[in-house]
Amino acid sequence: MMALEPKVYIVGAGPGDPDLITVKGLKILQQADVVLYTDSLVNDDLIAQAGEHAEVLQSSGMDLEQMVDVMVQAVRAGKSVARVHTGDPSMYGAVLEQFVLLKQNEVSYEIIPGVSSVFAAAAVLGAELTVPDLTQTVILTRAEGRTPVPEREKLRDLASHHCTVALFLSATLTKKVVKEFIEAGWSENTPVAVVQRATWPDQKIVRTTLNKLDEDMRQAGIRMHAMILAGWSLDPTITDRDAHRSKLYDKTFTHGYRRGVKASE
């Protein structure tokens, strides 16, 4: 097994289940000289697979400059660093600010993608988020809280598209979520599904509707680590009917690998 280059590897750990890291991400974790991980979010069972030679450090008590200093000093000493993030680093991973400081210090980095919590949540719900003739778009966003969102990305405006919406970091803002969806013209009985700690042993699932979202989440005690998925693709009865077939497997549809047949044949 070849040694890793002395640089920073930004590794997506996946949503929680240790088996949901990529093969490449796991190899880097096992080989890295230094492992820096978000201990409040990344599964310890995964981090336990780091090499015996590795220096394993928790980042929850560090600020940005402290984290980057650890990585910079390690790389300058000729070591490889696995900076392990929950889910996929590109979604609310706060990685850009790390890249800026690493670049200022002339330290190279590589991103290893991971399974995002939005797709883990869809998987445990048994849901397809893009359904023919129903919705073909998924908006990944969050409700506006202490961190503002750009003026053109207000939730009400995004919800006006009436497609599937996935809300990160919004479990404490459900009253605002409901208000903005209703103002965007959504029906009060629009299906909503909430998955807390998707793929962890203690994962919790709440299926509800828009008008009951806030109360049902309150009763379930969900205030953090939750993905909220809203839209008619989350209808729990959607698999009870055969009304949303794609063209991909339609026997009358011709494509580059299969010749379709006439409907009468």
Image (spheres, grey):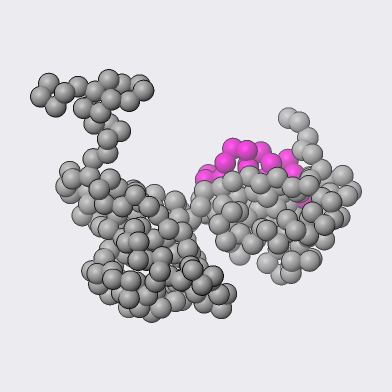
Coordinates of residue 104 in the picture (x, y in percent): 82, 57
Coordinates of residue 101 in the picture (x, y in percent): 78, 59
Classified by dominant secondary structure, the portion drawn in magenta counts as: helix
Height in image: 255 above or below 214? above
Coordinates of residue 71 in the picture (x, y in percent): 79, 55
Residue most extreme to the left? 264
Q: Is residue 196 visible?
A: no
On whether residue 212 falls in the magenta region, the answer is no
Query: On the image, which quarter does residue 40 sit in?
Result: bottom right
Residue most extreme to the front? 152
| 45 on left or right of 264 | right
| 257 on left or right of 241 | right
On whether residue 27 falls in the magenta region, the answer is yes
Height in image: 219 above or below 56? below
Which residue does the image show at 60% across and 50% down from the upper left?
12
Height in image: 26 above or below 181? above
Count of numbered circles on the image? 0
Coordinates of residue 228 in the picture (x, y in percent): 40, 64
Which image quarter holds the C terminus?
top left
| 59 on left or right of 241 | right
Q: Is residue 159 visible?
A: yes
Which residue does the image show at 82% across and 61% down from the upper left?
69
Q: Nearer the viewer, residue 54 or 89?
A: 89
Query: On the image, which quarter does residue 125 sit in?
Result: bottom left
Which residue does the image show at 26% across and 66% down from the upper left?
190
Q: Nearer the viewer, residue 193 or 150?
A: 150
Which residue does the image show at 25% across and 72% down from the upper left?
188
For the record, the magenta segment spans 19-34
Q: Nearer the viewer, residue 73 or 139?
A: 139
Which image quarter holds the N terminus?
top right
